[in-house]
Amino acid sequence: MRQMRGKTIKRRDAPKTAAILPKGALCSKDHTSNNKGCPAFKAAFKKAYPKVPRKGPISNPHQTTHKSYAEATRNQSPHPNQVGEIVSSFISNLRSLIDPLISLLSSVLNSLIAKGIISP
C-alpha cells in the first residue's frame, strides 16, 4: 500500500497512466520531483547566481608570482658585504636613538644634583 495524492492505493491496483504524475514541491506542476527540473527552481537559481561577464582574457591562469616551497627554502646566504652593510645600518640607527636619550638622562641627573635631590 502507498499514498498517492492523499489516497491509499495498493500496489497491484495502482493505475499505470500518465494522469497520475508526481507534483513538483516548489511549483505544484506535473513533473518529476527532482528540483533541478522544476521551472521555479531554475528561475530562483538564475536570480541567486547571475552570470558575471569576464573582464578580459586570462593569458595563463596557472602562472603565479609566488615562490615555490623549494625556492623559498633554498639555502641562499647573503654576500659578506651585504651583511656588513646591514649591521652598519642597524648600528647607526641604534646610535641615533640612544644618543639623544643619553644626553636627556645626563641633563636630568645634573639638574637633580644641582637641586640637591640626589648626591653625586
Image (spheres, grey):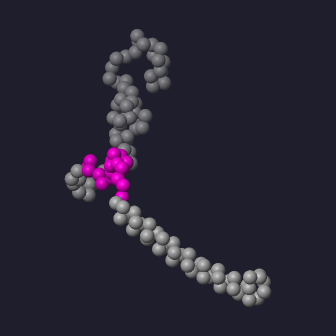
Residue at far bottom of view: 114
Q: How many numbered discs?
A: 0
The x, y position of residue 115, in whole percent, is 76, 88
31 in relation to 106, above or below: above
Q: Which residue is more in the foreground, 42 or 73?
A: 73
**Residue 43 at least partly seen:** no
Position of 45 relative to 28 (above/below): below
* Quadrant where the C terminus is found in the figure: bottom right
Task: Pinpoint residue 108: horizontal percent, then vertical percent.
Answer: 68, 83
| In this picture, residue 76 sits left or right of residue 118 | left
Nearer-the-camera pick, 51 or 66: 66
Q: What is the quadrant of residue 29 in the picture?
A: top left
Residue at image coords 73%, 85%: 112
Q: Is residue 30 above or below residue 79?
A: above
Membership of 42 in magenta stretch: no
Q: In front here: 20 or 37?
A: 37
For this orientation, the residue located farthest to the top is 12
Q: Is residue 23 left or right of residue 94?
A: left
The rendered magenta stretch, by its main secondary structure, is classed as loop
Q: Does residue 15 appear in the picture of this structure?
A: yes
Residue 2 in the image, given as x and y percentages of width and height: 47, 17
| Magenta residues, start to end | 61-78
- Residue 101, position in %: x, y? 59, 78
Q: Residue at coordinates 40% horizontally, 10% vertically from top-left?
A: 12
Q: Residue at x 45, y 25 (%)?
A: 5
Against 5, is 86 above or below? below
Q: Is residue 75 magenta?
A: yes
Compared across the picture, whether 42 is left or right of 119 comes to left
